[in-house]
Amino acid sequence: MSHPVVVRFAPSPTGPLHIGGVRTCLYNYLFARQHGGKLLFRIEDTDSQRFVPGAEEYILESFKWLGIQFDEGVSFGGDHGPYRQSERRDIYKKYVQVLLDAGKAYYAFDNKAELEAARQATPNFQYDASTRGQMRNSLSLGLDKAKELIAAGEPYVVRFLIEPGEDVIVNDLIRGEVKINSTILDDKVLYKSADELPTYHLANIVDDHLMEVTHVIRGEEWLPSSPLHVLLYRAFGWEAPQFAHLPLLLAPEGNGKLSKRDGDKYGFPVFPLEWTIRDKETGEATGTYSGYREEGYLPEAVINFLALLGWNPGNDQDIMTMDEMIKLFDLSHCSKNGAHFDIKRLLWFNHHYLQECDEKILCEALKQQVVAHGADPKSDAYVETVVKLMKERINLPKELWEQCNFFFAAPTEYAEKSMKKWWKAEAPQYVSELCDFMEAQDDWNGETLEPKVMEWIAGKGYKTGAVMNAFRCTLVGEARGPQIFAITDLLGKEESLRRARVAVERLG
């Protein structure tokens, strides 16, 4: 195609945006940016029965958070609007008539009962060249009779006329040549008089053509529709865009498509933002679906992770900025096979980006958690020091309190596993003697205190691990945390010794 690359992301506003849709949009974005092209945002809302209030705004907010920018479309403007299909009724009617006038489509009047009766009478029934003559349509009834029925107010649909026995070839940029014989295709409904709206198939083709889309990059689940779309382009006399069908996002285990049920099972979101579930009748909130943003995932981590689910950059690079992804992106490096959603790998990416993020984000998160647990955050400087010391240990900001709580509140319980290993019969003596020695030191600084303590332990003939791990348990409540003298530096002399002596008295 001679004109610049134009791709589109065209979701239906039927609920929260699935993370698989995010990946599809990301690949479109990377492809458009690499080729100096445009990314359009179109809303495909021809199915009025499934419309969910707030879904469109949710989708837009998701991409704003993720840093994926559109060049034109709903809320962005442009020369090809309107970009909501529900606002393009007159456009579609025009092109439905083009197909009818050319004999490429026909009217059908079969109601639900008649269609169900046909399915019952014919195993694996489909509305095609072998059955259309037995049904109520303008081909079997004649055009004059069809127009009489329409004039009388009879509900109808317009079906695409597919001739059998033709090999339809789709040249896919990922899967190569895909050949399907038209005999297996049914005469799809293109338009419904009931709501005066087209179905997905017609609206999709018309919009992509009028919006000058050059490449259609979409999920594998749409691959069976592509031969039909090629035939529709041919019926209009238009050049079809290049197709690329991406591999499915699979559940962590098995070969099933990633679903909300998998997220619930394995404990991770499948939506970018939190979504409030509302009763269809009353609009009242009945629950929520968790989102990556609210769970504490950084957008850079989500984008980096998703980019590598089904595509590889051709090298061993894992961590990539958006600019690096744009430079390296190549559809020919996309897999044909589904990609398993590995939440541990996403956590690994999030851990990396948390180490590089503005520490103010983590400091604010920790302060909120400290206050929520009824503890005193002390000061911004204290919180900042704790974050610097502990952020290496977390994958998500919500883990900060669990990792850092002993800096803000003395332990009230002591972990059984740690006590069993380190609180032996001699532990109270070791800790009491260590407290006496440390209390006598004028300089409470870890760098100078540590060698003195080590020398004292050696002089006593004690084992370092037995002494220091027992001491750690008194400060933390279990054998975990950073370097012990980093803990004593932050807690201070008075609090460190107080905790140790309280533990000796309690544990005995």
Image: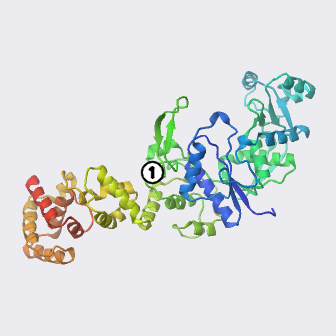
Residue 77: x percent and y percent? 69, 54
Is 269 or 256 nearer to us in this picture? 269
Asked whether residue 117 is in view, the answer is yes
The local secondary structure at tag 1 comes to helix
The coloring applied to the image is: rainbow
Question: Residue at coordinates 91% horizontally, 28% vertically from top-left?
Answer: 143
Instruction: Give the quadrant of residue 111.
Output: top right
> On screen, 226 above or below 428?
above
**Type of residue at label 1?**
Glu
Front residue of 375/221: it is 375
Q: Position of residue 415 (x, y in %)?
A: 21, 53
Residue position marked by numbered label 1 in the rendering: 294
Q: Position of residue 198 (x, y in %)?
A: 76, 38
In this view, 381 is above or below 238: below
- Residue 17 appears anywhere in the view: no
Question: Relative to residue 301, is residue 22 drawn left or right?
Answer: right
